[in-house]
Image (cartoon, rainbow, N blue to C red):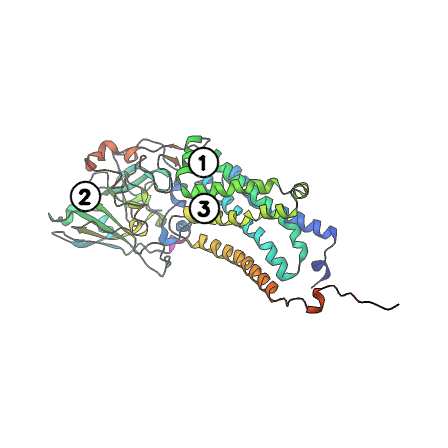
Amino acid sequence: SERLATIASPLSTTEAMTERKAVTSYNNFYEFGTDKGDPAQNAGRMLTRPWTVAVEGLAGKPRRFDIDELLKLAPLEERIYRLRCVEGWSMVIPWVGFPLAALLKAVEPLGSAKYVEFLSHYDPEIMLRRPVLQWPYAEGLRLDEALHPLTILAVGLYGEVLPNQNGAPIRLVVPWKYGFKSIKSITTIRLTERQPATSWRRAAPHEYGFYANVNPEVSHPRWSQATERRIGEIRKRPTLMFNGYAEQVASLYQGMDLRTYY
Amino acid sequence: MPNFLRAPSGTQIALVKATVFLACLVPAAQLALGWQNDTLGANPIETITRASGEWTLRLLLITLAVSPLRRYTGLHWLIRLRRMLGLFAFAYAAAHFTTYVWLDQFFDWQAIARDILDRPFITVGFAAFVLLIPLAATSSNAAIRRLGGRRWQSLHRSTYAIAILAVVHFWWLVKADLLKPFIYVLILAALLGLRAWWREQERRRQLSVPPPAKHLERPVIRIVQK
């Protein structure tokens, strides 16, 4: 796979990284099947060139970006982040990407923009047709979350171009939120005034909230979120508030009841 | 139908039993080997939990399928496999429970108790496992004799409830893709539906039997002249 030139980031963790094989073979990408191994089997059918991302909505300069243009928008950084899945497992992944803020600033968000909506690629010819979730997959962030320096658009992992099953050619990574917020294979980014509808929340609103911040004190209705299994390890470890990024992000949620806004 | 299928000899039945026994061990052997060789994927504990749980469910449904199969094929000797299949269902359930307690929770009894009390899908799964224990414990011929056929049979009817709990357990743990649990629901509904249908037929049959003829109602005393 193609190598990407990257610079190191002080925002990276020094924890042991999850094996590349596990990162690229154990995936939730329901468009390609709901078993963990399905995306690695099936996502090869997706063509990631040509690819454009429309950045639209409440922006002064909305426009469509070509993927090769996005790769040159900002210096590519290696960001080694913890990833915590809502299912209770976690990984440490060396992403390659750039801050989402760099892209949003390029389109000049209007003062009325409060949220960012994201949509995934959906092609029924090569993807799941059963409406397990509402397609295309949709996610969203509050604008301040989207502009936070930890929030990146990833185009690679382990120093190489992103494999399809991990959301090629470009995906979101929000490391203090459960993995499902980090939408894959993005085609549309829309600045909005109202909080956008998101796929998992549509499917089960009492189980998956808009915020989906990693929080060991707020259980999923069907299982505890207090602990997690780091892939590659046997014993579970305690889950950290905001997935260990509390120092950087807790201030975003000051005064909010995180049980209500789960 | 060939004769050995309709009325197999003792040796043939022993052979079939041995084959089914080995076949039931295959999933367990695969998991043990996979664990040993680290080929169970990125999350081997999840793989073992899922596989042991699903095999429990499959074996429960196969056990429940024995009677209908026997009835519609006329292969009456199939009943002689049922106990073994039921005991394998119990063995996989025990492996599933052990995996959860040991590998997944690592004997964190507090977390386990909270799971059983607070998480309905674990509550019903645990209930199904607990209900299986008396059935496994009374599976020997000696136990059947001790209980008496009628009591043994009514105790073992809890299999139906156990299968329902097991399917609900699976349904409730799935995040969004209900296709697989739905298939199990359909199979279980068919197996239980058949039994309801048989009972109904039996009831109708009994109602439609003509009342005994008048002349048979009272003993007829005939005086025969010697």
* Image coordinates for residue B195, horizontal then vertical, percent: 56, 57
Counting from the top left corner in percent of width and height, residue A41 is at 42, 51
- Residue at image point 68% right, 41% down: B142
Q: Which residue is mark 2?
A: A101
Residue A74: name its quadrant.
top left
Q: Is residue B160 visible?
A: yes
Depth check: A97 or A257 in front? A257
Disc 2: host chain: A
Residue that appears at 33% across and 54% down: A133
Q: Which residue is mark 1?
A: B104
1 vs 3, front mark: 3
**B33, above or below B205, in the image:** above
- The residue lying toward the viewer, choosing from A238 and B117, is B117
Instruction: Give SS at disc 2.
Output: helix
Would you name the residue on which mark 3 appears?
Answer: B169
Task: Give me the C-alpha separation between circle 2 and circle 3.
Answer: 44 Å
Asked if the residue under mark 3 is in contact with the one under mark 1, i.e. CB atoms within 8 Å, the reply is: no
Pointer 3 chain: B
Whether residue A42 is in magenta: the answer is yes
Asked whether the residues under marks 1 and 3 belong to the same chain, the reply is: yes
Q: Which residue is pictured at 50% across the width and 38% down the height?
A: B97
Amino acid, disc 1: Asp
Q: Which residues are magenta?
A: A41-45
Q: Quadrant of the C terminus of chain B?
A: bottom right
How many other residues sit within 10 Å of disc 1, few (<14), some (14-19) or many (≥20)? Answer: some
Secondary element type, mark 3: helix
